[in-house]
Amino acid sequence: LDQYAVYGNPIKQSKSPQIHLAFAEQTGQKLHYRAHKVELGRFAEVAGQFFAHGGKGLNVTVPFKLDAFEFADQLSGRARRAGAVNTLAIQDDGSIYGDNTDGVGLVRDIHDNLGWELQGRRILVLGAGGAARGILGPLLKKGVSQILIANRTVDKAQKLAQQFEKLGSIAGCSYADLASGQFDLIINGTSASMSGDLPPLPSHILSNDGCAYDMMYSANPTPFMRWAAGETAWAVSDGLGMLVEQAAESFCIWRGVRPDTKPVIEMMRQSLS
Ligand code: ATR
């Protein structure tokens, strides 16, 4: 059987094996997929052994997306722009291809699954870390009118915005700077939800038909989702659909077959509660 795995640390929480095995069953693909905890500092060594022993592809999660970026022999344009790799695939010539499917996963969930318009919309992205960075290119390519990145450390938001300037209208700011703005979509790319925190958001920054998306997911609404509901957002979602969509894109890169994500999102939603 063709071998696939997800590498991360920690890895116990990973839903990738469940998702990829559901895709494999649905599409009639025969493969093996497991989750593996890699010790910090040993990514290149362990990934090198995996491919040397016939492994076909890897998903890469926190904290190894930069290591995977370094490890790849070739990079997709979107991986280069994101500065991070979440999908590795061995090529026929034995070289390793690196891609990043996070951003396209987010865009598919928002646009195709949730049906929220992106074109011409004003977007606020919260956070300027790896998660935020991965989604900027695919959002700009979808024709949004502007992106503002708000971050506690303003400097990081501004530097990140500068790197995407060529793709569209994008700027960085502090949370305090948001008070006078209005946005059609707010995407939470901070890790605040993980510790039950909410970035310091002013009230009334969501437009009348504004939507809110948290890249995190959990059985219960996150603090950011509860905030958005209190601001009478038109629609609110967590990031479970993004998780399944980024996996589907990886699966498609590896197997050349695109799975139907809807039943898998539903299955994952049920397994959360
Ligand atoms: P990731 O790769 O998940 O994005 P990261 O690179 O450590 O992780 O980035 C975490 C992001 O969440 C950062 O933008 C961080 O803000 P700072 O750059 O100012 O540190 C943001 N973040 C984390 N906890 C937060 C909180 N409680 N409130 C607001 N922002 C928070």
Image (cartoon, rainbow, N blue to C red):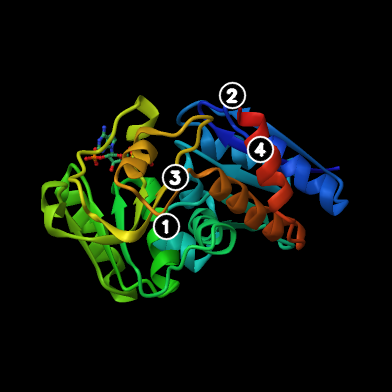
The mark nearer the N terminus, 4 or 3, is: 3
- Answer with the quarter of the image where residue 59 lies: top right
Q: Nearer the viewer, residue 97 or 218?
A: 218
Q: Are marks 4 and 3 in contact (CB under 8 Å)?
A: no
Q: CA distance from mark 1 to mark 3?
A: 10 Å
- The residue that label 4 is drawn on is 268
Residue at position x 48%, y 68% in the image: 77
Against 46, residue 121 (above or below) is below
- Relative image position of residue 102 (x, y in whole percent): 51, 53
- Which mark is in front, 1 or 3? 3
Whether tag 1 and tag 4 are in contact, CB under 8 A, the answer is no
Query: Would you call the spot at circle 2 few (<14 residues within 10 Å), some (14-19), or many (20 or more)?
Result: few
Residue type at the position of mark 3:
Met
- Residue shown at 11%/47% (left/top)? 176
Residue 210 in sight in this render: yes
Callout in the foreground (2, 3):
3
Residue at left 76%, top 57%? 255
SS of the residue at dot 2?
Answer: loop
Helix, strand or loop at disc 3? loop
Q: According to the image, label 1 marks what residue?
A: 135
Helix, strand or loop status at disc 4: helix
Percent of width and height locating residue 149: 25, 56
Q: Amino acid at mark 1?
A: Ile
Q: Look at mark 3 in the image and give the residue it sits on.
A: 215
Residue under label 2: 12
Quadrant observed for ligand 1 in the rendered image: top left
Q: Amino acid at mark 4?
A: Met
